[in-house]
Image: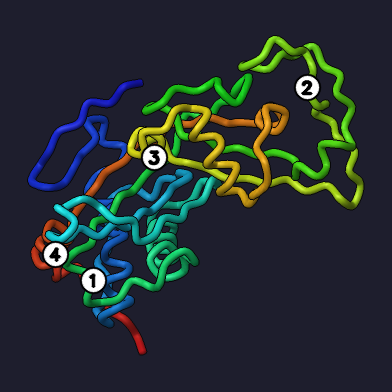
Amino acid sequence: MDLDEKLIGDAKVVEDQVCTPEHCYHAFDAIYCALTGATPLIPRFPNDKYPLFVTWNTRSSRSGGHPRLRGCIGCFEPLRLHDGLAEYAMISAFRDTRFRRIEERELPKLECIISFLTDFEDASSYLDWTLGIHGILISFPHPFTLALSSPSSSTPSPLSSSTSLPTSGLRFGKTKRLLTATYLPEVATEQGWSKVEAVDSAIRKAGWDGPISEDLRRSITLRRYQSRKCTVGWDEYYAWRTANAKDAVDVVA
């Protein structure tokens, strides 16, 4: 389902209200309080369950206002939002190993993007998804194990007329190992990738640095999904916090 969006200030709000600025404020509040020692505000939104991702970007005048990724980690297990958003806000801010920890001095340049993941579907091939609509979650056997499989299947490659495909029930015994990676729906279009380029990048992200062959692509199990997201900047968060300071939760030493 295509989602119409509108702008309210600098906060992007999804029309169906699945993901709202309140969710972003709660995530911001978690790291603000962790960095400053302030007391957290009480969340007012329902404590629903969703798989979710929390993304932190920074924006600066030197980069022309373009966002720069500072952390992005999530969970495909549905989480209660009151605790789950706060937990993954801090994990993505402080424990994304690709980046140094977010520091207090960076707060005025931060923006928070919350993504709730929905509409999970098993794809028929690694190309069975739509750019700009679907995120992808791939898993595939470590390529060293592919040689152990029997190339006998009637399912053709989406890029080839060949009918050879490694069997899905590979027997690896103790050597069995699956590699996994995901990209949220917006990533491929933001990077200007084709579907093949996005899948190849996900293969690299999963940890494989060897050659990427068509057989490797065809060994992938791909789940596609959609997201409902909202983006909020620091100024919007801080205005919200100031207006609602009376709702701070007392912290007992």
Which numbered circle lies on residue 50? Answer: none
Mark 2: few/some/many CA within 10 Å (<14, 14-19, 20+): many
Q: Viewed as shown, does residue 185 lie left or right of 36?
A: right
Q: Residue at x 28, y 75 (%)?
A: 33
Residue occupied by mark 3: 187
Q: Position of residue 96 (x, y in %)?
A: 46, 64
Q: State the residue position of label 4.
A: 238
Q: Nearer the viewer, mark 4 or mark 1?
A: 1
**Is 204 above or below relative to 147?**
below
| Above or below, comparing residue 160 to residue 214 in the picture | above
- The earlier-in-sequence mark between 3 and 4 is 3
Image coordinates for residue 136, horizontal then vertical, percent: 51, 34
**Which tag, 2 or 4, sits closer to the chain's start?**
2
Question: Dots 4 and 1: beta carbons under 8 Å?
Answer: no
SS at mark 1 in the image: helix
Mark 2 and mark 4: Cα distance apart in space: 54 Å
Depth order, front residue of 66/44: 66
Crowding near the residue tagged with mark 1, few <14, some 14–19, many ≥20 C-alpha atoms within 10 Å: few
Q: Is residue 39 shown left or right of residue 161?
A: left
Q: Please provide percent x and percent y for residue 36.
A: 25, 80
The alpha-carbon separation of the residues under discs 2 and 3 comes to: 29 Å
Q: Which residue is identified by label 2?
A: 165
Amino acid at circle 4: Tyr
Which of the two residues, 188 or 39, is positioned nearer the viewer here?
188
Which residue carries the number 1 mark? 106
Structural distance between the alpha carbons of marks 1 and 2: 49 Å
Instruction: Mark 2 or mark 3: name the one nearer the start of the chain.
Output: 2
